[in-house]
Image (tube, rainbow, N blue to C red):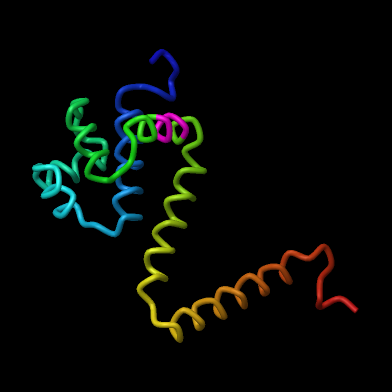
Amino acid sequence: MTNDNFSNDNFLYHIGLTIRKYRTVAGISQEELGARIDCDKNTIGKIERGESDVKLSTLGRLTSGLGIPFSRLIRESEKSASKPLTHSVEYDYLRLFQYCHQLSPEQFNNLCNTAHLYVKSNQLNHLPFSRSKK
């Protein structure tokens, strides 16, 4: 790990983000994941925040509890360390998906209409010509 992107703290941070991403997608709490792998929820939180130098055996239990291959956790963590902005945008989309999944059809429709109007108004503001000039 000689690359700056793979310093121990940075790598642990990205391992944690990847674990949090898969836990969020699975729709389970830190407490539920902890119960699945016999680990305290506070420890899960520290791992997800990159505050704990986690053992390989614990990572193995985490991947089993999340139902993902160990190699995927490492691969995606390495990828996110080299492209942190992409990973955070991916994570934001996953959080938005989880939020939208909980909405009623009417609430979801209202959210989509609001987003559409917002995007449309921003596109009009960024046109190469001004609408006020005639």
The mark total stands at: 0
* Bounds of the magenta segment: 75-79
Position in image of residue 29 (x %, y %): 21, 56
Q: In which quarter of the image is residue 81?
A: top left
Specify the farthest residue to the right: 134
Q: In which quarter of the image is the N terminus?
A: top left
Position in image of residue 127 (x %, y %): 78, 65
Residue under the point 39% across and 82% down:
104
For this view, does 84 lie left or right of residue 134? left
Most foreground residue, 38 or 129: 38
Residue under the point 14% across and 42% down:
37
Q: Quadrant of residue 39?
A: top left
Residue 81 lies in magenta, yes or no?
no
Specify the farthest residue to the bottom: 106
Most foreground residue, 72 or 125: 72
For this view, does 83 lie left or right of residue 123? left
Most foreground residue, 36 or 31: 36
Position in image of residue 91 (x %, y %): 42, 51
Position in image of residue 62 (x %, y %): 22, 39
Residue under the point 9% across and 43% down:
38
For this view, does 21 lie left or right of residue 44? right
- In this picture, is 54 found above or below 131? above
Residue under the point 23% across and 32% down:
59
Q: Quadrant of the C terminus?
A: bottom right
Prevailing SS of the magenta stretch: helix
